[in-house]
């Protein structure tokens, strides 16, 4: 079944799922004494949205299933990666900087968990709308195929970038900055791959028609990855290292590009 009614039902269940997940994250974060648990539940939120849309949505089954598989696999991998990365570690310096010293629980709930919950619904709108839209037809199959390719490429780039960074951190002979593999072509391959995946998801969803108008969702995700909580914020901390400043001079900021020696302008 397609239309506004089923769409509102999928949206309502998704909002309920995100509310429960973020509330649980707040409780866990308070118990363990660090708020970067929110990074672990970021992917899980989309896993739930993907499953809810895939099961409850009555739209085109091929597109609905494709989007659900991509989002669920991506979300599970990311959440497990963040769990392994943060397990046994202290608070992420980005949250310490963002929240300031000794923030109150209400402040953390509003600025971290509620904000992330709203962002998950916003970014997940193409998944929700696509799940209750009619079939893909005609030339829109080209858009669908391009979306699948972009999502697959983005997933591979993000996963490979994370694996290369993990190997670098475990290498006792590592240099002062990670500039191997994908990291020689872009300073943030994981964020770039993430953005590609979500633009791909939007393209797949848009091949059904109505989700075309949810383009603000991948735009928002790209903004988060580059400016709000991602690359720019991380760069401000990393730029304190002289080796990283030199790395910035020779390596593209976001879009992969062959490394250079003298070019200073970001791509």
Image: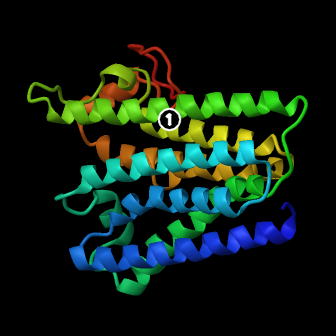
Specify whether 240 is left or right of 129: left
Residue in the foreground of this view, choosing between 79 and 118? 79
Q: Pick the quarter of the image with the N terminus.
A: bottom right
Q: Pick the quarter of the image with the C terminus.
A: top right
- Picture mark count: 1
Specify whether 209 is left or right of 9: right
Q: Position of residue 95 (x, y in %)?
A: 34, 64
Q: Position of residue 171 (x, y in %)?
A: 14, 29
Q: Is residue 125 above or below residue 194?
A: below
Residue in the foreground of this view, choosing between 75 and 221? 75
Q: Residue at x 46, y 30 (%)?
A: 157
Q: Residue at x 39, y 23 (%)?
A: 182
Q: Residue at x 10, y 25 (%)?
A: 173
Residue in the foreground of this view, choosing between 140 and 29? 140
Judging by the rendered image, the residue that carries numbered circle 1 is 155
Q: Position of residue 52 (x, y in %)?
A: 62, 63
Mark 1 secondary-structure assignment: helix
State the colouring used for the structure image: rainbow
Specify whether 211 is left or right of 190: right
Q: Tell me if residue 98 can be seen.
A: yes
Quarter holding residue 48: bottom right
Question: Residue at the left extreme?
Answer: 172
Quarter holding residue 260: top left
Q: Tell me if residue 253 can be seen.
A: no
Q: Residue at x 71, y 59 (%)?
A: 128
Q: Residues within 10 Å of mark 1 (few under 14, many from 20)?
A: many
Residue in the foreground of this view, choosing between 25 and 105? 25
Q: Position of residue 46 (x, y in %)?
A: 54, 57
């Amino acid at each position: 079944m397609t239309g506004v009614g089923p769409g509102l039902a999928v949206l309502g269940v998704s909002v309920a799922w995100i509310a429960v997940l973020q509330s649980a994250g707040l409780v866990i974060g308070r118990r363990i004494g660090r708020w970067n648990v929110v990074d672990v539940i970021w992917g899980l939120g989309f896993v739930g949205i993907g499953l809810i849309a895939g099961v409850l949505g009555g739209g085109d089954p091929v597109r609905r299933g494709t989007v659900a598989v991509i989002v669920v696999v991506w979300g599970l991998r990311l959440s497990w990666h963040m769990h392994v990365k943060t397990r046994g570690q202290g608070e992420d310096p980005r949250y310490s900087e963002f929240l300031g010293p000794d923030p109150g629980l209400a402040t953390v709930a509003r600025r971290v968990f509620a904000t992330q919950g709203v962002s998950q619904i916003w970014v997940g709108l193409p998944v929700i709308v696509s799940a209750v839209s009619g079939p893909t037809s005609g030339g829109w199959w080209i858009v669908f195929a391009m979306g699948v390719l972009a999502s697959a490429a983005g997933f591979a780039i993000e996963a490979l970038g994370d694996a290369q960074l993990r190997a670098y951190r475990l290498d006792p002979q590592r240099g002062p900055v990670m500039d191997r593999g994908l990291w020689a072509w872009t300073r943030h391959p994981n964020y770039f791959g993430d953005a590609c995946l979500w633009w791909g998801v939007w393209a797949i969803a848009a091949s059904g028609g109505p989700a075309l108008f949810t383009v603000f969702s991948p735009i928002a995700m790209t903004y988060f990855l580059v400016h709000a909580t991602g690359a720019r914020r991380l760069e401000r901390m990393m730029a304190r290292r002289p080796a990283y400043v030199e790395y910035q001079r020779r390596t593209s900021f976001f879009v992969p590009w062959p490394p250079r020696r003298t070019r200073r302008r970001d791509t």
